Amino acid sequence: MKLLAGVPGWTVNADVIVIGSGVAGLTTALNLRANNLSVLLVTKARIDAGSTKWAQGGIAAALGPGDTPDQHKKDTLIAGAGLCDSEAVDILVTEGPEAVRKLIARGAVFDKSDTGEIALTREGGHLRNRILHAGGDATGAEVSRALLAAVQGDDGIEVIENALAIDVLKNAEGRVCGATIHVIGAGSRDGVGRALARAVVIATGGLGQVYSQTTNPSVSTGDGVALALRAGAKIADVEFIQFHPTVLWRELSESGQQPLISEAVRGEGGVLVNIKGERFMQGKHPQADLAPRDIVAKEIFRQMAETNSPHVWLDARKIADFKERFPTIYASCISNGIDPTTEMIPVSPASHYASGGVLVNMVGETSVPGLYACGETACTGAHGANRLASNSLLEGLVFGTRISGDIAAHVPPQTQPVEISTDSNSNFLLDPAIKSELQSTMSKGAGVMRSKESLEETLRVLEKLSKKASTTPCIEAWEISNLYLLAVAIVHAALERTESRGSHWRSDFPTTSANWSKRIIQSYSNTGKWELETVEVK
Ligand code: SIN
């Protein structure tokens, strides 16, 4: 099954195609260049439009005095609620410090303490101060700036902006050897074309736009995961959608990207209170307001239900230097009429991060030869059922390096694709008009709390929406078709997992079951049939 698209009108070649320009894509591209491979970097909007630049809190790495990768591993495993892949976590925490040093060598500047050391703060689930940050709460913007400067200074990386990767191309042996790409441009690279390469790396970020309220930007429509599914790749752990506990609450009717209030605000002393003014995290978890993210999000949800309120409060008034420490958050609060230095901030959970994604091995290879995935698009198993705060930028840095090494060492020379069908009977496309109904049904039935009943109802609505086909290929139609595939995959896995664990919370199965120390893996066949298997955690 492929997306309906026009016939390719142009061709471009490179050793490797990297799809996506966040920390994962940029790191992979730079490391491919270090291995003397040419790179075509395609990105759906402007090169800096993805999720990375919105990351506030930072990057977790065991760099502080007394901290060790082993302690970082312990915190990651606890947050992951028994479903982390131990090898993936080992790699993340042991290779993390070096990856961060390399990022600093590439020009990223992190905040320093009064003594001139890198300042380290704390976020939910960490028992140590190990979060590096930049510009106070603008870490992602600084990481993005530094990596982009390096990419833009490298003649061996061709960047195509405003380019949506539609589907992969395969050779006669079924190996990925390129992708069809739609460029909104002018001149020789306008419309659909073919990019040919020895390997394709998908690093398109998250899928937050499956839900009505998300911290993700509008470009986060899960294009890479959906493309990989259509290519026959396996995906894993997609039921574990992480809801960030503290997203600025504005109006119930607000949809799309919402302002994040970093966990680091609680790391610096902010506390949660319900609308009666009572603190509620004490006694619920030994780390109280700094418990792992899933625990805090669930407790906020409970408090909202019990007090019949659409939000709780985050009280950060005791943070003396709030304006200087959190300039981005201060500005977004002020622009929404709240002064966080004198008033409490209304917050509620919103979709934030996909802990699952395209199943990959420890060098980022998917189950389809020639196709790699990195960052939020991928599922290395490092996050288990709930990603530990600030492990995501780190994962992009560590696995971007590993992927490029593997491609340089093992990928065979470029081959030619077999012709792709543009026959509308074997291809599909949905009507962009279904987007808000898809998002609201997912938020209602497959959000923070789910049940068999709510998930089955969600599946029924999705089935109805799938009948609304489109015959007009365009960005919005490809995006909604991608969102639809992912919504179905999330609901399938959420229905299958009859327990509560990490960020998957079933009201009808409220406890964690030892029988469910398993991962759910799905694939989607050429004829549009879903397959689902469960495998024991390594
Ligand atoms: C935050 O700053 O709270 C978000 C960090 C993350 O998602 O890891």
Image (cartoon, grey):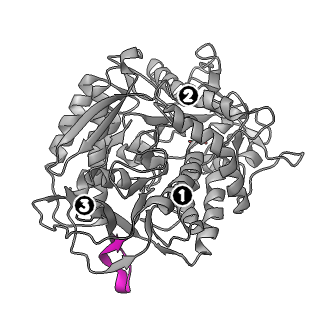
The alpha-carbon separation of the residues under discs 2 and 1 comes to 27 Å
In the image, the residue with mark 1 has its CB under 8 Å from the nearest atom of ligand 1: no
Front residue (pair 361, 440): 361
Quarter of the rendering containing residue 76: top right
Residue 383 horizontal/vertical position (percent):
50, 36
Q: Secondary structure at mark 2?
A: helix
The C terminus - image quarter:
top left
- Callout count: 3
- Residue 189 located within the stretch drawn in magenta: yes
Horizontal side, residue 183 vs residue 302: left or right: left
Residue underneath mark 1: 405
Foreground disc of the pair 2, 3: 3
Quarter of the rendering containing residue 319: top right
Magenta span covers which residues? 182-196
Label 3 crowd bin: few (<14), some (14–19), many (20+), radius 10 Å:
few
Amino acid under label 1? Gly
Amino acid under label 3? Glu
CB within 8 Å, label 3 to label 1 = no
Label 2 crowd bin: few (<14), some (14–19), many (20+), radius 10 Å:
many
